[in-house]
Amino acid sequence: MINMEPVIGLEIHAQLNTRTKLFCSCPVGQKAEPNAHICEICAGQPGALPRLNEKAVELAARAVVALGGTVNAFSLFSRKNYFYPDLPNGFQTSQLDPPVGSGGGLNLALADGSEKFIRLNRVHMEDDAGKCVHDEKRDRTLVDLNRAGTPLIEIVTEPDLSSSREAMDFLKQLRGLLTQLEVTRGRLEEGEFRCDVNISLKPVGSETLGVRTEIKNLNSFRYVGQAIDFEIRRQTALYAAGYAIEQQTLHFDHLKAETRPLRSKEEAHDYRYFPQPDLPPVTVSPETVAAIKETLPPSLESVKEKLIASGLTLEIVNNLTATPGALDYFLAALKAHNDPKRLGTLMAELFLPTIRSKGLAPSEAKLTPPKLGQLAQLLAEGKLGKRAAYEMFGELFASGEDPLTLAGAKGLTLVSDAGPLLEWAKEIVAANPEETKLYLGGRKKILSFLVGQVMRRSQGAADPKKAAQALETVLGALSQ
Amino acid sequence: MTINQDTALAVARLARLDPSLDPVALDKLTQDFGRIVSYMDILAEVDTTGVTPMYSPMLEPLGPRPDEPKEPDPQKAEALLAAAPERSGRFFCVPRVV
């Protein structure tokens, strides 16, 4: 059988971080009763005239510049016609040709430390649809138009991705960048960042792409990974059995972790795009693009390079840049403890997993950056052991208490007073005559074994560095 | 462009109209549709060589607006809900689609 490899492209929808909708002044992103934030325009009433939100254009252009694409000086909105109850106009206002941005790409950091450039095809603006809710009791559909008209950008990649891992890492990196730039709030659980996946198989080394399927509306990185893996297995099995792949749109059922057809080919939409006559062309001047370039923070690439140069591993750096707000938190904590490596490890191993499991943003944590810095400082000074730090972290995170106070209260601070350490050292030396003899005979490495014994005797309370000094004192006295 | 019954049926399906029309009605619809579209063909007779495409009929289009929210208007929302053929509380109500 011919070996096949997957070819994956993504279409990412990111809600733009505006206060109002794309074509009217209704507020977006606020909790409200159903249909409280609607007007003639977003509810699609006849004769209503849409008017473009200038902030949405600015944010879209900002994304294009940051992604290395070309902001088109002139772009057009078109009507994309289809019927669905959450789309009151009977068309989505989207951009076909030309879109606000063309080209660009992102350097994807791969697990082995290398990089792969993922090309972008285009970035365009469009409005979001409302929401449908199924009414089980009466077997009908209820429609809420609060979300209708919310500004989105759609970012379309070239089919440059080749695994679920790459697709997930790309999405994390893209979300990290767009949230850092405040282009989108990027909250997945709110549907502010979601994607469609296009996937096909081709013989290894071949240039010809196979028939592709499209998995719609995935709003979690994990689902993206599961859906791609399932679809690769499904298509591979079909090829192996000699069946053709049918071009179709799929839905991912996350409970069963499988894809299912959403619409068959016969019902594939014919969108009959045409320029939206109610809206003038969108223009972005070269001056605006230049101004955006000036206000962009240093690129993520250069920040990452600096962090890696300071001794952090690529994995930790990716961890810090993939979580919105984590990098700012880290930089603030560095002011309290200027050892990026120690602090980065604490962030990656303790802080970030905890905020993720609790669904918090770094800035919402009770444990403030200076306190995390203090924790790193205690570890550096040997006042707190690594195990103890990990043990008390949950409580420290929940209470936001002073790390030294909490460690003291829990009896976790390390013993570094000479008195008890010398007592333990004498005890251990007396109990291990063989090892003592070897040490005195010149086998200095045996010291670490003896330090281990002191740690055990003290039930982990001894400061290992100070314990080694105490042992050297006791052993030194014996050799004289 | 000529409109045949297949095209008329395809358009009906896209518009979510019942395609099981009786043959007489479908025939009439197809002819009407054909006449409208061929009327538009008159436009194609104009020689547009070298003419810049017109993207908008508006001579002085409304420029973009600032991103400033207006206070939601409960009366307006209520009027929109009231205008719907069917509602349920604060929701618009349609035959089952999901």
Image (cartoon, helix red, strand yellow):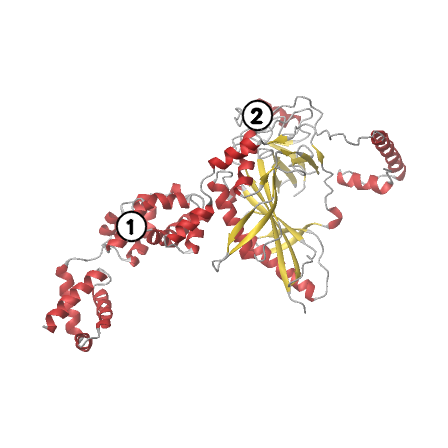
Tell me: A133 left or right of A186.
Answer: right
Task: Mark 2: give few (<14), some (14-19) or many (20+) Cα within 10 Å.
Answer: some
Tell me: A210 left or right of A363.
Answer: right
Type of the residue with mark 2: Arg
- When asked about the image quadrant of residue A154, the answer is top right
The circle drawn on residue A375 is 1
Residue A315, horizontal then vertical, whole percent: 43, 55
Residue A296, horizontal then vertical, whole percent: 47, 38
Q: Residue at x 56, y 24 (%)?
A: B74
Q: Residue at x 50, y 42 (%)?
A: A178
Q: Is residue A260 above or below residue A333?
A: below
Q: Quadrant of the N terminus of chain A?
A: bottom right
Type of the residue with mark 1: Leu
Q: Is residue B98 above or below residue A164?
A: above
Q: Is residue A396 above or below residue B46?
A: below
* Residue A334 in sight here: yes
Q: Quadrant of the C terminus of chain A?
A: bottom left
Tell me: B30 left or right of A317.
Answer: right
The circle drawn on residue B65 is 2
Disc 2 secondary structure class: loop
* CA gap, disc 2 and disc 1: 49 Å
Which numbered disc, 2 or 1, marks the residue closer to the eye? 2
